[in-house]
Amino acid sequence: MTANPPRLIIGQTLGFSADPFAEGPAAAWHDTRGGVLVQDGMIAALGKAEVLRAAHPQAVVHDHGKALISAGFVDAHVHYPQTGIIASWGKRLIDWLNGYTFPEEMRFADPAHAARMAGTCLDLMLANGTTTACSYATIHPESVDAFLGAAQARGMRVMAGKTCMDRNAPDGLRDTAQAAHDESAALIARWHGVDRLSYVITPRFAPTSSPAQLDALGALWAAHPSLLMQTHLSEQVEEIAWVRDLFPQARDYLDVYESHGLLGPGAVFGHCIHLRARERARLREAGAALVHCPTSNTFIGSGLFDLAGLKGAGQRVGLATDIGGGSSFSMLRTMAAAYEIGQLSGSAIHPAQLWWLATAGSAAALGQAGRIGNLAVGMEADLVVIDLASTPAIAQRADRAADFWEALFPTIMMGDDRAVTETWVAGQPLHRRDG
Ligand code: GUN
Ligand code: ZN
């Protein structure tokens, strides 16, 4: 059997040697004529394009000229079952869940619907340059099978979990403490560590789980401590007041999770907008990850995530679309929203910081640093090729850029799937904008 020939992808390359929130823009490296050599799904070499070309004459060359080659985007918090209700008008969180989300999630009792929506969601992600996502499924175990099966067929590194709820949800969308435990355990056995797939223990959020269900999932996590656990924390003020009514003995929202064994370095908390000082301190001590969902936070009217303050305090933070509370599949649009929320909060987030959040930062928040989210030898070859002049408005602005960051920023602020010329997964091109 002959091995696949290596592929050499040439363009401007961008990666990170450190966290630019800690080290500033110098934590990023950029090469105007760089190359990424890919073999057997991995990054085999990096460097100057012409040096790599000379050293690897057998490689198949993909020359993208002035386009930017980066690690693929990592979307740290999505609900794939909400693909069909993205951009639904006029409601805040609790009414939005009851009015739009739960009726749609009910439809995932039908495995054919789940399979269709899983494929639609993953293909939209790939068209937007997203190569990894950490998704909530629905209450139905088959909805996890649908999503992880569709990701497996595409060769993607993806995480997902059955969304457990045993109260404050409609008939047909509730399990029990025991069923949540047992069905999650069966899904771990079926999927966790298979190919590039991971299972994530997923209580939806405190209001839809009884104390007994939170305990059961805490026990499951204790039995599988290397897994991630994802849930929502402190997203909207009405939600926080509801949690206080439901758990009057808890010190605060985070304490509900902590007191049921659901806080640790593998915890991934979506939103984290209205945190109290004690919650910030405990999250930091525990080494949990916080996920910023900026288009969702403006779309549902939740509030302004304190990105600069939380990163400045040393928190682990990832970035996410939060489809379908979020209003875009594009991590470019999501970076733009993070920038806008930063401005409203008094901080201009640098493009190096935005790009890091959407790649290496999100990967680290999901415990995947060193595997995905950056260009480095030995990492998995999940890549995106970005056209930095994808529309006339972007092109004319990038044309007058004085440096690389100024050339990139118009694509961050105004770019979308038209900027994504190719998306590579495990060393193979899975999406091509131009067919
Ligand atoms: N809180 C609990 N469930 C959800 C959800 O599906 N989306 C968002 N944005 N917040 C939630
Ligand atoms: Zn969410």
Image: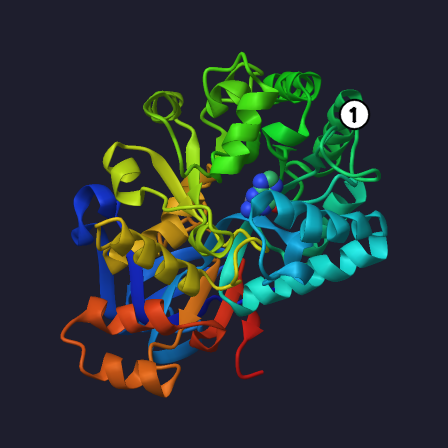
Asked whether mark 1 and ligand 1 are closer than 8 Å, the reply comes as: no
Quadrant assignment, res 349: bottom left
x, y percentage for residue 36? 37, 64
Q: Quadrant of the C terminus?
A: bottom right
Total labels: the figure holds 1
Query: For residue 317, what is the image quadrant?
Result: top left
Q: Residue at x 27, y 86 (%)?
A: 396
Could you tell me which residue is drawn at 23 percent across and 37 percent down? 312
Which SS class for mark 1?
loop
Residue 86 versus residue 103 in the image, above or below: below
Which residue corresponds to the image point at 86% horizontal and 52% vertical from the top-left? 110
Tell me where residue 184 appears, x and y as whole percent: 73, 30
Q: Amino acid at mark 1?
A: Thr
Taking the spot 83% from the left edge, 38% from the top edge, the residue there is: 171
Up-down: is 432 above or below 43? below
Residue at the disc numbered 1? 176
In front here: 124 or 233?
233
Question: Which residue is more in the foreground, 46 or 301?
Answer: 301
